[in-house]
Amino acid sequence: MTAPTRTPVEAPTFVGQSMPRKEDERLLKAQGSFVDDEGMHRMGYAHYVRSPYGHAKILSVDTSKAEAMPGVITTLVGDEVKAMTEPLFQFAPREDGSQVIEYLLAVDRVRYQGEAVAVVLAETRDQARDAAEAVEVDYEPLPVLLDGVEAADSSAPVLHDSLGDNIAWKSMFDWGEVDLALSNADHVVKIDKLHFHRYSSTPLECSGVLVNWDPGTDMIRVVSNNQFPMFGALVLGPSMGVGVDQFDFVSQDIGGGFGIKINNYTHIGVLALLSRKARRPVKWTEYRTEHHQSAGHGNERTFTDIEVPVMADGTILGFKMKAFDNAGAYLHYEPLGAVIWSQVVPGPYKFKHVQVDYTETLTNKCPAVPNRGYSRMQHIWLVERIVDLVAQELNFDPVEIRKKNYVQPEDYPYTTPNGCVYDSGNLPAALERVLELIDYEAALQKKKEAEGTGKRIGIGIGTTLDSGTNNFGQSRILNPELPFSGNGEACTAMLDLYGEIMLKLGTNPQGQGHETTAAQVAADILGVSPEDIRVWAGFDKSHSTYIGFSGTYASQFAVTGINAVIGATEKLKNEIITVAAAVFGVDADQVELAGGSARLKDNPEAEIPFIGIANMVFANNAELPHHLAESISLTCRHVYVPKFEVPDTDKKYGNLTLTYATQTHAAVIEVDEETGKVEILDYAVVDDCGKRINPMIVEGQVHGATAHGIGAALKETFEYDEDGQLLTSNFLFYHAATSTDVPAIKTDAIESPSPFTGTGAKGMGEGGGAPLHTICAAIQNALGKDAPIVDDSHNPPERVWRKLNWQGSPDERGVTVLSTSEA
Amino acid sequence: MLLASVDYFRPDTLTEAVEALGTPGARVLAGGQSLISLLKLRAAQVDLLVDITRLEELRGIEVLDDGSVRIGAGVTYDDMATSQTLADSHPKLSDVASFTVDAQVRNRGTFGGNLCHNDPINNFPPMVAALDGTMHARGPNGDRDLSAEDFFTGYFANGLEADEILISVTVPPLNGRAMGYQEIEIGEAAARAVAAIGIDDGVISSAQVALGCLPVPTRLPQVEQRLTGAQPSAEVVAEATEDAGEGIQPVADADASAEYRRAMAPVVAKRAVLEAIEQGGRHG
Amino acid sequence: MGKGPGPIHEIELEVNGDTIHRAVSARQLLIHFLRDELGMRGPKIGCDTGHCGACTVQYNGKTIKSCMMLAAQADQAEIRTAESLAGPGGELDSLQEAFRSQHALQCGYCTSGMLMSAKFLLERNPSPTEEEIREAIHGNICRCTGYVNIVEAIRAAAGEEVSA
């Protein structure tokens, strides 16, 4: 079904206004409710025992000393979990049925530093912590495998005997005719290797679970900050042998998620089992070090053997390459990322010929999970590196080559080589605007003037796509047997007994302002103000309405959540009008809603306030025609379902995402030649997410995504040593971007409405990682052709310094050009 | 994140503090900005924390008769940053204290704690080394003085006995010298240099240069020799500091290799000297 | 107990104007005392090593990270948390109002600590430059806002003109 249309109201519209948020009051007054703020009567505190080794056999686990310590209630170890659960769901078992076998705690073997081996429950936090140290685990270290490319080799140590090798998933993606393009092109640019590094958004609040498995009702009540609880339920249910109907999920305020908190359902499972064993509620809050070691890392991807056919006029025909994704030790959401990137195969460009030989491997690193920009960011970074290097090597202007190869405004809706439909946009205008914001001409001049001063100026451009509302049918490209497709979200709009307006969402935001934007949209429909609408905060399975996709992730709320709100609110509006029309004795089209009442269009004095409508339905129904009293509930649920089909899994072809927001970034940087340190002198972003419901909230997301990208580009990385020890295991070593790292970010916006969403809005939020593309381009611009290419997404001073001091020959820089003509 | 079992004691006098330090496993708790972190990570084993943060005997910044400045070990970075006395006598000390780490740490972290902890990334050890500061310690057997060389003994180590406490540091007057302080920050400092330069009649009359971000703050006597008597020009300084990285053993971590840190030593040394030269002539 | 060395200590302190008497374990951090014992929600835990600043409170008028102080060290001290900012009827103070109008918070987890650091800055320096603001909140990590609107909010609270 198509998205519902909005009915215009005479009042000033709230949609489009930069209203301050409803959520803010409680958060500013420290009255938010985060998971650590909550408690349950007689709860115990849990503490995990985790592997210090990157790879080891578990010879034995002895909890007897721990259990004898003061305050200890009970413990749980892997063998117990194995005895009472099934292995966790895997997206893509092999054809012969073999798959990664993972239980909620480690069994027989540990495969990454920080993997949970056992858990202790005690009366106090301190007692649990002390007792965890007394759990004796006998390990036999095994060889550690860290490199995602080496892992594909048959000689590498094998992590999972059930697989026999380290291949999580492997496939060839091939659209167009890239070999023909390569042989016909005027130039072929070859790039040896590019590497997108491992990092994460490291939400400020770590994971937390408060769970009680009630022995009487067999209900599992979970207070947590999981951001996609229904996915968690779908995985945990079969593993734990419980029905999803036994789970009650509750969350109110969540301190950032960014995709990482999709994965913490594993803790919900372990701690629920612990609660059942102990017959006590269990509370657990994650340490920062645990979070960095085990919560989940963003995708780390290596691209090799990249060949790019380019015509003399700068048209880039496409590219051919191998991709290796380092999924870490277990597959918690992977290998979905191996398909998700194909939402943006040509990036923002009109490339027609693309071939990717894609391998996802398992290594002794923390499992990869969706991280802000999930899998599309890595791919678009690769695309932007290609465009940037093609421009540099073939002496094309970086602005002109982009404009030439961009999808043009008149091309939309634009179908990409694999059948994805880019809905709308205006990339050339965005690029022009962002260059204005950094005063591009002046920056070029500055660059010239800086030559020879010891500080080089670099100017970089990065264009990205923030694809939103994905078609889960793309999971079938991984595995045709998967029973997933489409997407959607649910909302209930209702009046309470005195006519109070309520919205209950299926989403559980972590700062995106859903209470406000939902209220803005509903207010316009009902003819009230957002202050008149109570949006229930957070997600509570006992009262929220939901479907399998419910949660807050993947840049989709403005489409899925908002359209669910619109649908539900329009249904409520129609019910209110129906009741009023019956009371007035007129047709429904004679009635409108304004100022909190239903009134006659041609006699506004004749009005029934919502309290009156509610009264008649809930407490006074003899005054209503009987058929209405039975059919009107004033509790209206709507599930928004975007129009998708199941993709062709053989051709890997189909529309995988409904909307494509764009962001175009530009940066002027200064590189200190002596130290390799990069300072950002100027930074600007032009965002286009179609119709913006609350521009201030949109801009806030742009700022946040930009800060995450800048942090990752220059300071943030998950580095392991050769023994599989995570070196950047907490904020002492992992340098999360601070207020002095992020510059003042200039922003502007374009609105290219999406033709597919009814409202014209597109999802946004993740951002698409553009700062990484931009800063790499800026550094490349500063380095020029005398240095090795910028081949890594992470560029701390030493990496830049080495390139500045490199003494090699031009064809050793990581890029070579073959030209067939003197073009 | 949670501490192991530990005892705590807050003595009312310095004498009580020294006595308490005689207990095996006792350790001074000053600002706590380093020690509490170690305890949370369970990287240090302490049985008794002796809290000296309220001892008046350890506070105060005063100018002595010869122009030296005595800084109490318990003086916080914020105290240093807001001290007019210090801003007048040793502005660079006050300046560094005003931007080190962050505001919350500055309100608690102590000068003495910074020196005793001797983490390579700490700001003050190389400053004290460059200034030839003297550390005054008190133990059960009385007081003694330690030079920078005797005080900074190794990686996270100092020359105090287990039952001694640092009570103050005396820093000689600048007498017209100016200071430079340069670092390369990659999350934390990866290289740092401090210089104190005196210029008379257009010639460098005295030079003290120390490197930080090393297991011990390290003076560079050869660099100092080359600079003394030389022209305060950029070329001279670059040449004089060229080999500042030779022989040093910086500790590598995820931010930068030892090779990079070694290569940066001459860069920060040069920059610190040039900064001091630029500042020169304005004090004394 | 008593005043000598030991694992348990009696403390008396003022928290947001209320006088509190408790016996605390020497090993307990102030952050855990404020949250678990007194039920405060303002100061929060975001890291293990004293870097994130989510636990920032005022201790005798100066900001500190309450995860880097023992509860026992707070004896005789005056502590103020973010809960102390709003008026008696729950009215947001001008700093909180500025945060709201400038959209200086998203998930809200850093906000309590950030407000305390902002307040400390403005008490000392009523007209800070942008650089001074960024330096003042350097010890408070935010992962949502990119700091842009936080800086704007603090400027607005300081009476500077900000863009709409």
Image (cartoon, coloured by chain):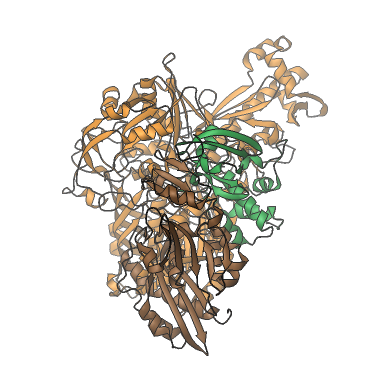
Residue B115: x percent and y percent?
44, 61
Task: Work out which residue is located at the far front of the displayed protein and give it.
Answer: B141
Question: Chain B appears what colour?
Answer: brown
Task: Depth check: give the residue in front, B155 or A316.
Answer: B155
- C138 w.r.t. A209: above or below: below
Q: Is residue C90 among the parts visible in the rendering?
A: yes
- A343 w.r.t. A445: above or below: above
Residue drawn at point x = 77 percent, y = 26 percent: A599
Chain in orange, by letter, is A
Residue A115: x percent and y percent?
31, 39
Task: Depth check: give the residue in front, A602 or A560.
Answer: A560
Residue drawn at point x = 60 percent, y = 36 percent: A515
Quarter that holds the C terminus of chain A:
bottom left
- A440 w.r.t. C22: above or below: below
Residue drawn at point x = 60 percent, y = 33 percent: A566
Chain in green, by letter, is C
